[in-house]
Image (cartoon, helix red, strand yellow):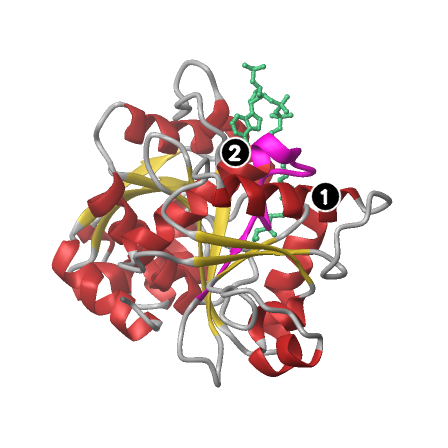
Amino acid sequence: MIRNFAEVMTIARERGPKIVSVACAEDVEVLMAVNEAKKEGIADAILVGNQEKIAAIAAEKNIDLNQFEVIDIKDMTAASRKAVELVSSGKAHMVMKGLVDTSIILKAVLDGEIGLRTGNVLSHVSVFDVNGYDRLFFVSDAAMNIAPDLQAKKQITENVVQVAHALDIEEPKVAVICAKEKANPKMPDTMDAAALQEMNEKGELKGCLVGGPFALDNAVSVEAAKIKGIDHPVAGYADILLAPDIEAGNVLYKSMVYFAGAKNAGIIIGAKAPIVLTSRADSEESKLYSIALGVLCAAKLF
Ligand SMILES: CCCC(=O)SCCNC(=O)CCNC(=O)[C@H](O)C(C)(C)COP(=O)(O)OP(=O)(O)OC[C@H]1O[C@@H](n2cnc3c(N)ncnc32)[C@H](O)[C@@H]1OP(=O)(O)O
């Protein structure tokens, strides 16, 4: 069972290297992360984007561009489509978002012709290493599905459980996060949470233990769960925090990074290959960990 990003990096070195195609690679943190991934033997890269800007950053940061193939495409939509097409045509194992809006790269991923759709729901998984905790936290979905219904939430759960399995967490504990721990018909997300727990109990959602609804405190604090008298094996011990919608998921993601100083990584799963996807404002370290997470998933799930 992998418990932190140091272990993620160790296993990525064993399971790599994989080839990552980077969409709009003209970004300092992305190029430094890709360079580090190459040095670590985790990943090789094909850089798609504005060659002039890529070269200027490389010169400033002492990155040897000769070690990478560079494809000069300045338009962001065209560069995203090319990076995705490199994966669908088998030239790369995974695609990575560079300096481009999330919806532009996701539209390329969803494209019927060159995209990476499988028929399943695609969803974002963020992984956090938070000080003071002995395990990684997985949050889904902070970046792709805007307002998932119950069926979509079931598939989002299956996707994030797969990522946990790729990190050798055999039966991850999934807490379906809401504003309270009792189902209330006036709060539809609490009803979905109870339904997801029931699906898990009936064996319709496998490979994990699901509990909900839970407020965030009851999901991650044994003490808080005790005070509220919650008797469920997930209470206080959650690995996976399933957000009710993109707003809650994204706020949780950014709170982890900015308030808790968490280390983080992000990936889209459910497609034909992993899609490395972090916030443009995330650090070089976070981008490197995301590549490593992509390598672990590419090696284990595809
Ligand atoms: C966390 C760090 C990074 C961030 O902070 S990201 C910030 C916030 N994120 C975003 O802005 C992205 C939010 N999502 C979106 O913008 C859109 O949902 C997204 C992903 C671009 C898709 O939008 P559109 O291209 O307008 O797509 P659409 O809804 O018209 O659907 C087109 C076809 O794609 C399919 N589709 C959409 N989402 C899917 C999914 N999750 N999994 C599988 N298939 C999906 C959809 O069914 C449709 O299929 P078809 O063409 O009808 O066969």
Q: Crowding near pointer 1: few (<14 within 10 Å), some, many (20+)?
A: some
**Circle count:** 2
Q: Quadrant of the C terminus?
A: top left
**Spot occupied by residue 238 in the image (x, y as percentages of width and height):** 50, 65
- Label 2 CB sits under 8 Å from any ligand 1 atom: yes
Quadrant containing the N terminus is: bottom left
- On the picture, is 103 further left or further right than 30? right
Q: Is residue 131 left or right of residue 171?
A: right
Q: From the viewer's perspective, is residue 112 above or below residue 191?
A: above
- Ligand 1 quadrant assignment: top right
Q: Is residue 115 above or below residue 283?
A: above
- Residue under label 1: 191
| Residue type pointed to by label 2 | Leu
Q: Quadrant of residue 291?
A: bottom left
Tag 1 and tag 2, C-beta contact below 8 Å: no
Under circle 2, the secondary element is helix
Q: CA distance from mark 1 to mark 2?
A: 29 Å
Amino acid type, callout 1: Met
Tell me the mark number nearer the camera, choosing from 1 and 2: 1
Return the residue at label 2.
Answer: 106
Q: Position of residue 151 (x, y in %)?
A: 58, 31
Q: Position of residue 158 (x, y in %)?
A: 44, 41
